[in-house]
Image (cartoon, coloured by chain):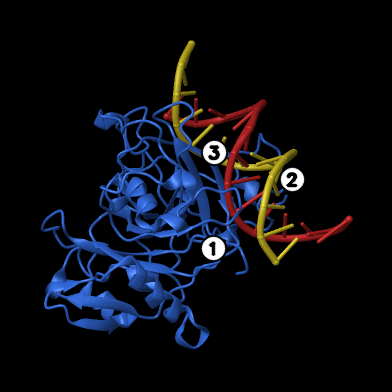
Chain colours: A blue, B yellow, C red
Amino acid sequence: MGDDNWDIGAIVRGCNINRPNNVVPTFENDHDDWDFFYRLLDDDQMTNFQGLGDIFSRTSPVAQQQNSDDLSFEIINPTSSVPIFADQVKIMDQNDNQQLLQPAQLRQQIIFPPPPPTALTYVQAVAPQELIYPQQQLAQSVRSTPVIQTRRRKNQSIKIIYELRQEELTDDTWAWRKYGQKPIKSSPFPRNYYMCNTSKGCKAKKHIEKSPKAQDLFVVAYYGEHDHPPPVNKSCRAGCARGTKSKLPRGISIFPRALSSKSSSPSSVSRRRRYRSSVTPLSPTPTLEIQNGSPNKDEMVDASQRWQGRSRECCYDS
DNA sequence: TACTTTTGACCTCAT
DNA sequence: AATGAGGTCAAAAGT
């Protein structure tokens, strides 16, 4: 903590979500918001969840958004790489009755709409002014869905994380180009890095990785801001910048770490040993992957079936 | 030919 | 200061 303003725990605010069962998350005013949350963050009142997904996982079908005043929750953790989660959230119903909900109750009562393409802009403006990075103070009129904001490194721009189903990966206004992929220590699945491909010089980036919690869930994190309007042409959106062959972001690949006997960047592997090499690995571990151009591009498939015709020799020492 | 993807190397930052 | 993880670069390969 100390004088680092970012050592503040979670911020939960009510805003902009569906209202199943007439539950309306809200707060009386900003001051009360913060008092309430600082109380929640006291050690003896805080319980860390296993992850934000515990709150935000969609356990039921996404509800139709009734109107633009729908409310939603968000949790913002601007500082630490290990998110802190409130174990209770104050809810006001339409009769102004207050109640504190436990996570399980939240999961039951709050159904989140899919993320709109303007989510980034909105989220950046939600936190009280003193907790927003200067570059994040944008228009507050845009409404959005539940998110997390974190940053791992001090110069890293704010990160907003969604947990999306596979089909929801397509709900992205922007065009993205993949520029990297890395195995992540905390996950058996690699992280795929994308940069905005709509405008040259745009600082917006995102990464996608498969959630270890469920087969059809993906963790999508957004960084930075777009410095241009979204592309209008549908064929130039959501990673399909060069064509319309796939609705999915291009090049999403998910290979469990177990496939690789080495670390993330085995230096002994030469560049010429690429995919489509002729050697089939021994006993490939069944994996999940999404590849463009697959027979059914919108489905995750058991990648082990495709190992028969395509190997990744680079993952093995010879 | 132009563009995207892949992936090892390299860099930065946190611990 | 050393180490490792995460993020980016860029050449090669694919489309």
The answer for how far apart the CA atoms under marks 3 and 2 are is 20 Å
Dot placed on the residue nearer the N-terminal end, 3 or 1 = 1
Q: Which mark is residue A276?
A: 3
Residue ID at (30%, 30%): A231
Q: Which of the pair A26/A230 is nearer the observer?
A: A26
Query: Is residue A148 found left or right of A257 in the rendered image?
Result: left
Query: Is residue A132 found left or right of A278 in the rendered image?
Result: left
Amino acid type at mark 3: Arg
Q: Nearer the viewer, mark 3 or mark 1?
A: 1
Residue wearing tag 1: A188
Tell me the subunit letter for badge 2.
Answer: A
* Disc 3 and disc 2 in contact, CB within 8 angstroms: no
Residue A278 visible in the displayed image: no
Q: Give the image location of residue A185, x and y in percent.
A: 60, 62
Q: Give the image location of residue B15, x and y in percent.
A: 70, 66
Query: Is residue A177 found left or right of A234 in the rendered image?
Result: right
Residue A151 to residue A21: above or below? above
Amino acid type at mark 2: Ser
Mark 3 burial class by Cα count in 10 Å: few <14, some 14-19, many 20+: few
Residue ID at (37%, 54%): A301
Q: Give the image location of residue A140, x and y in percent.
A: 30, 49
The answer for how far apart the CA atoms under marks 2 and 1 are is 21 Å
Q: The residue tagged with tag 2: helix, strand or loop?
A: loop
Marks 3 and 1: same chain?
A: yes
The residue furthest bottom is A44
Q: Which of the pair A69/A5 is nearer the observer?
A: A5
Residue wearing tag 2: A267
Q: Give the image location of residue B6, x and y in percent.
A: 55, 40
